[in-house]
Image (cartoon, rainbow, N blue to C red):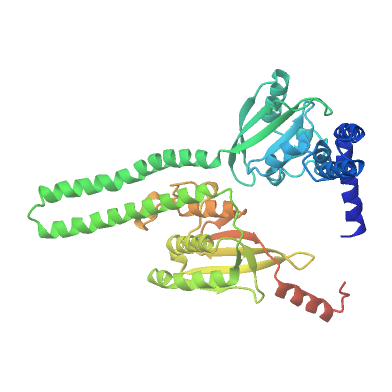
Amino acid sequence: MNETTERGSVRLASMRLKDARYILIAGALAIAAFAASGAIGWLSGALLYLIIALAAALPRRSRSMRLAARQKAPAMDWRQAIALPLQAMDEPAYLLRVDGTVKFQNEAAEALFGVSEPNTHLSGRIRSPAILGMVQQAMEDDEPRSVDHSERVPSERWFQVRCAPIAGAPARDHGGKLYLLTFRDMTEARRMDRMRSDFVANASHELRTPLASLTGFIETIKGPAKNDRDAQARFLDIMYEQATRMTRLVDDLMSLSRLEMKTHVAPTDRVDLNRLVAHVTDSMKPLAAEMGVTVALTVPDERVVIQGDRDELIQVLQNLIENACKYGQSGGRVDVAVDVLPTDEGYGSAELRVRDYGPGIAPEHVPRLTERFYRVDIESSRSKRGTGLGLAIVKHILTRHRTRLVVQSTLGEGTTFIVRFERQKTPNDVVLRLIDKEKQGLRVS
């Protein structure tokens, strides 16, 4: 036992004796009375008093120990008791004073709106008049209020925003009472509702024609062509083609619905764009050869790494190359290229381009190409087994990747689809950049 521990033990023992002082005084008087009357000897009385004093000094849960324990582990402040649960919430939350200034925000709120400096007004980060008006009304009425709010950038999201006073919070803080502002994410529920309504509307519209064809052919086979083998064979081929079209349509609708459910969640994987483009181009060459189209690939020598979802990017490139082969078939050629657009530091964007040499697209059609079921030429699209959803799927995938599709087209010259991605730095890129600077005689800091 070291000296500090010994001092602590002595101090605690003296505190226990102090707590038991009245009992010790009473015991001493009683023992002295007995010794004076001759009932016990003075030596025996002294030993008895010593035993009582030792018992009083033994450890126990006395008031002094409870006070010492409370001093050692002070009670949690009420502000901490509010802030800690808010930090554990997945939903964005703000703790506001009655004057609208921010006292606390959790990490979810920082991720959504950015960091608010202490004691700054809520309007410094949230500019929605509906939210600010709702908060002001809740503070004036001292009652809970809520409002629906939507974010358009970087993707469409919906929130139910609620502001309510915190009951039981002491009014000692600057500005008095505190209010809790929370954002409940309703994106998934809204997308589910939209998905159901869109699916019903789009599916009923697009499935009506093939279903009518199937019904008509079945009635013909059962009636006038009942004994006509050649007509039955011809009708069955057409029915199979219509059924296959409906299958593709349903598959595209389901793919589009799955994408809409996660549009607001950006992918985090790293993808080698050169390898991905080379893989997809090789896999599409047999389809292009069937249409009499040659696919040419051009990629840079350096490695191009981007952030994205590999499977979704493959779907994007497949759709773009297939469309270029189908609708630019008359040009006989499709060029696929990856270009690097460097910045001053040697990094920047990677640009993916798919170009055909077909008839091109009229300017009035270009802005609407990514709309669902929009077709420049309906008969041509259906004859080429198009569902009208390919570019809509591409648009949703690129929205999730925080980029967009750019279309450049000139009538009679062809169409170019361009997608630009932000490059990701890799250790090899850094080493190569340093080597290049040394070769150029530049100082490397």
Tell me the quadrant of the picture where the C terminus can be found.
Answer: bottom right
Q: Look at 83% across and 79% down and name the residue there.
A: 438
Left or right: 236 with respect to 427?
A: left
Where does residue 165 sit, x and y in percent of width and height?
70, 26
Could you tell me if residue 121 is visible in this image? yes
**Extreme residue toward the left, this view:** 227
On screen, residue 40 above or below 331: above
Left or right: 386 with respect to 75?
A: left
Where does residue 141 sit, x and y in percent of width and height?
70, 18
Left or right: 199 with respect to 163?
A: left
Pick the front one: 126 or 412: 126
Pick the front one: 424 or 211: 424
Q: Look at 31% across and 56% down and name the residue there.
A: 244
Q: Look at 92% across and 57% down and name the residue there.
A: 3
Where does residue 247 sit, x and y in percent of width and height?
33, 54
Q: Look at 68% across and 30% down and name the residue there.
A: 131
Pick the front one: 243 or 225: 243
